[in-house]
Amino acid sequence: MSGMHDKFSTKHHNPHAHVIHQPGKRLLKKVPLRFVWNKVSGHGRKGVSTSLNLTAFIDFLITIVVFLLMSFSASGEIAVDKNVKLPKAENVDDVVDAPMIAVNGNQVLVDGTLAGSTRAIEELGRMQKVDELFNILKNKRELWKQVEPNRPFPGVAILQVDADIPAIVVKSVFQTAAFAGYPNVSFMVQKLPKSN
Amino acid sequence: MGGVDVGDSGGKKRSTNTEINMVPFIDLLMCTISFLLLTAVWVTNSRINADAQVPGPPDPNQELTPQTPEKVLNLHIAENDFGLVWKQGATVVSEVRVPKVPVEIKDGGRTLVRYPELGKKIEEEWKQQGGHRDPSDKKLDQAILHTDNRLPFKEIIAVLDALYSPKREMKMADGQVKPIPAFNMTFSVR
């Protein structure tokens, strides 16, 4: 046991040896067991510690960062009414900042405020002015003119209409918006990739 | 980890090769990716433009001069076909019928309808009859959509998509020339 201890002793016998020396394998080296020492120092076997080449990993991360930065949109997500399933189209423009009129199966909403009933328009069966919608839009227009007295009013409104809503409702809301001072009405759609 | 090799120093000089700890750099990249993924907008919404053609109040100081009415494309959506009627005032200039050939595209649980043949025919018609083609011309040719009151909105959008497929160039205020749809649409009101 004492011979084994001498063999594995790590004491410096040279008093002039440097205190600081090149680091080597340290873990488990002081355990006075042969199989542990063999495992640690190698002794013909494959080393237990290995270094990974990180170049490919860093290249991959940088590619992802560049892709995400390129597709990053600072404008943020535009809130779409959860009950509205938007139709899809190819030939589209970018969305602009304007009052959002959502038309789902039951209600007409302006920026989340109730502005009419879809069912009532459908049941009437002919085009009509939606009074609540008209008043809300007119108030919005007047407010805009008070806030921006030196700029011409753009008159832009965006309709978020459910794909299955009948044309009579769309026409009524469209015409009401025009009467309230919003003649430039756009329909919000989901963008489809261009087909050849 | 990562290292910088600047060649063999030779002799007894201290080695010039050095190791850079790449862990903070990988941490930074991971944080950036997490931030960008969390703030990403995955659904891209766009818009299709329309114009309700509401005239402004007349200027009392300006004398009104009678103008020749422009040619307007009237697009009728019928049960089995489309009608493309160019009218100048009340006069019919030309009339073409285009059979309804829907192309159905499966999109998840939904079926999208497209009318590519209608788009091609509208482009041909615009090349023959369209009045606003010069890039410096700020006006667009007008199209009036005639639909049945029960027609679902997705059908209207499919027709509008075909109507906006012909493009023309327009010179913008900043001097750039951009391709824009040749038509602007409004609904017919009876």
Image (cartoon, coloured by chain):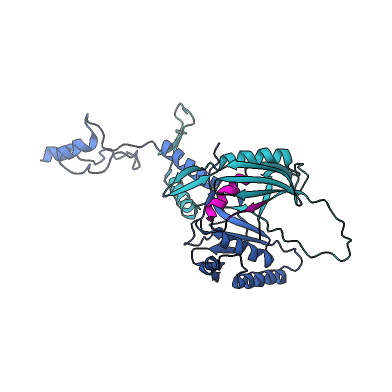
Seen from the viewer's position, the closer of residues A152 and A137 is: A137
x and y percentages locating residue B63 in the rendered image: 89, 61
Residue B153 in magenta? yes
Asked whether, in this view, residue A125 is left or right of residue B174, the answer is left
Say which residue appears at 45% left-offset and 33% top-offset: B15
Residue A75 in magenta? no
Residue B91 at least partly seen: yes
x and y percentages locating residue B188 in the rendered image: 66, 56
Say which residue appears at 66% left-offset and 73% top-offset: A139
- The magenta span reads B144-165
Seen from the viewer's position, the closer of residues B13 and B28 is: B28
- As drawn, the chain in cyan is B
x and y percentages locating residue A192 in the rendered image: 53, 46
Q: Chain A in the picture: what colour?
A: blue
Q: Work out whether B96 lies above or below B35.
A: above
Residue B177 at least partly seen: no
Q: Work out whether A82 lies above or below A38.
A: below
Q: How many marks?
A: 0
Asked whether, in this view, residue B38 is left or right of residue B178, the answer is left
Asked whether, in this view, residue B30 is left or right of residue B59, the answer is left
Seen from the viewer's position, the closer of residues A29 and A152 is: A152
Say which residue appears at 19% left-offset and 38% top-offset: A37
x and y percentages locating residue B36 in the rendered image: 49, 51
